Image: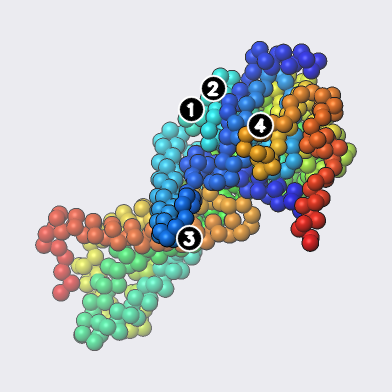
Amino acid sequence: MPGESNCQATNAAGRFPLELPIMATGNLQPQAIHSGPLQPLRDWIGEVGAAVVGRASAVGNFALFSVRTISWLIIRPPNRETLLPTFYQVGVRSLPVVALTGTFIGMVLAVQTYFQFSQLGLATRLGAVINMTLVRELGPVLAATMLAGRVGSAMAAELGTMRVTEQIDALASMGANPVQYLVVPRFVACLVLIPTLVVMADFMGVVGGYVYSVFVLNIDMHHYRVNSAQYVAAWDLFYGLFKSLFFGATIALVSCHRGFHCSPGAEGVGRAATAAFVHSFVLILVIDLMLGIVLDKLYMTLWPSGARLM
Amino acid sequence: MADTKRELSNSDPLVQIRNLSVEFGQQAVLRNINLDVGRGETLAIIGESGCGKTVLLKSIIGLIHPTRGDVLFDQHNLSQLNDQQLTQQRIRFGFVFQNAALFDSMTVGQNVAFPLKRHGQGIHSELYESVASRLAEVGLPESVIQKKPAELSGGMRKRVGLARALALNPEMVLYDEPTTGLDPIMSDVINELILHTRKRYTVTSIVVTHDMRTAQKVADRIVMLYPLSRLSHDEYQIIFEGTSEQLHTCDDPRVSQFVRGEAGERLMEMHDLTM
């Protein structure tokens, strides 16, 4: 029925992202002005331009959302009542899965590095490589991946459902800023708890790698420990934990942003949850690379002699 | 009574809408709307689905930003306020959502207590009594306090939504399709509650509805919006503004068709679709 379809159109419009005026003003479609031999070229340029402007406005929208979250965190920090349930969801409930992943990654690393290092006759150095890789790279990245999958998607789906059922509008109408009430506690929880989850992943990975190397691969216990202790320094642990702060912030902001800008219907919520994970994961890898380069440069500046594997 | 209200509204409007246009991408929903709502007045906005009633209502409370034009609430231009100032102004509103929009993770009691706690008006020991009395005002027993919104019927949810909207004694209550999806008896209960609320708190109300019984029963003034897609470029979107009596004597066929609930030329569209 025509009436029905009109109804849906208005509801869709009414539930559009409401926080940012940028969403309500964009008119990005190219308009055909002339026709002629150059028309296909004009159309193509128009489409490319519209796509560029669309992406740029999406990045700007996300940046504004992030600034708004951080400014609300400073203006009105979240209270205990809103923080504790979020801490429980993000931290306590993620702990088992992060610990399990950490254990297996430690063991997988032992299997893979042994295969290569034993051929070089460097099997006793295994501890150094496994633990270094764990605390610097795999611990933080895997903890962040698990967090993005477990918590990020859930946050996007929850906030998306709240958007679709007008609960976010209801919050705003009662004088509670939705960003302050919904996003800030999730942001704080991810930011504060991801280093603790990384410590857990690191610890379990170290234990998993040690157990597999010493008891399955029969590497000398003493050499494994000594090489690990000599090679892995406090800087490496800091390196991983520092990166994880950025991962946590990214997961919270991307997931909440996706949830807040969820399109109507069950499909919209599903898409928001998927996009939250995919976007977070890609950003985690990009940030990981960038921070890796920056932190290594910093390390070489501070300690030019550096650490030596051999 | 309607004339008195009208004079009051013209002398000191609480809400002033000036040349308001709202577009989503390329879809224009509202175009150059001008409307005043006087203090203490009850205004009904009617129109068919998709004409922009809800968008207009959400623009009044700043939930949707206008593409062009301004909304002034008590002389404050909502689009010029920052987040904090807007939050302060919103405490003066109560909004009853179409599907109640109750927080489904909370109980009914926590829902009604939310605005009280949020704005420090609920002393912990008195909170339960405040919530119970708010619920009693909308005819709900104390036993619903511990229930989750999913356990309630549509009519009960709407009433909880009204109790929550009235918790902070707002100066203005906005109702979005308050009777949609309810049986005739429950619809009338909601209509009576709107009247009762107005009598008790002397609030200004805007009721968005396509239920003619609601519009006629509660409104001092009725405006009718028409979908932009059915209007020519220079036509004004508000096709009727007046009292309930004037609505019935209006000779615009689009208005009389809506009042009588006749499909008219829309049947032809349906015929085209089925061919």
Mark 1 chain:
B
Q: Which residue is mark 2?
A: B76
Structural distance between the alpha carbons of marks 2 and 4 = 26 Å
- In the image, taking residue A9 as reference, residue A194 lies left or right, namely left
Q: Are marks 2 and 4 in contact (CB under 8 Å)?
A: no
What amino acid type is highlighted by mark number 4?
A: Tyr
Q: Compare marks 4 and 1 and give the one earlier in the sequence.
A: 1
Q: Which residue is mark 4?
A: B236
What amino acid type is highlighted by mark number 2?
A: His
* Rendered image: mark on residue A277: 3
Which x, y percent locates residue B208? Answer: 72, 34
Mark 2 chain:
B
Structural distance between the alpha carbons of marks 4 and 1 = 26 Å
- Within 10 Å of disc 3 (Cα), the crowding (few <14, some 14-19, many 20+) is many
Q: Which residue is mark 1?
A: B80
Let me know if marks 4 and 3 both belong to one chain: no
Residue at screen point 79% across, 61% down: B275
Indicate which label's residue lies in the foreground, 1 or 3.
1
Q: Compare marks 2 and 4 and give the one earlier in the sequence.
A: 2
Q: Are marks 4 and 3 in contact (CB under 8 Å)?
A: no
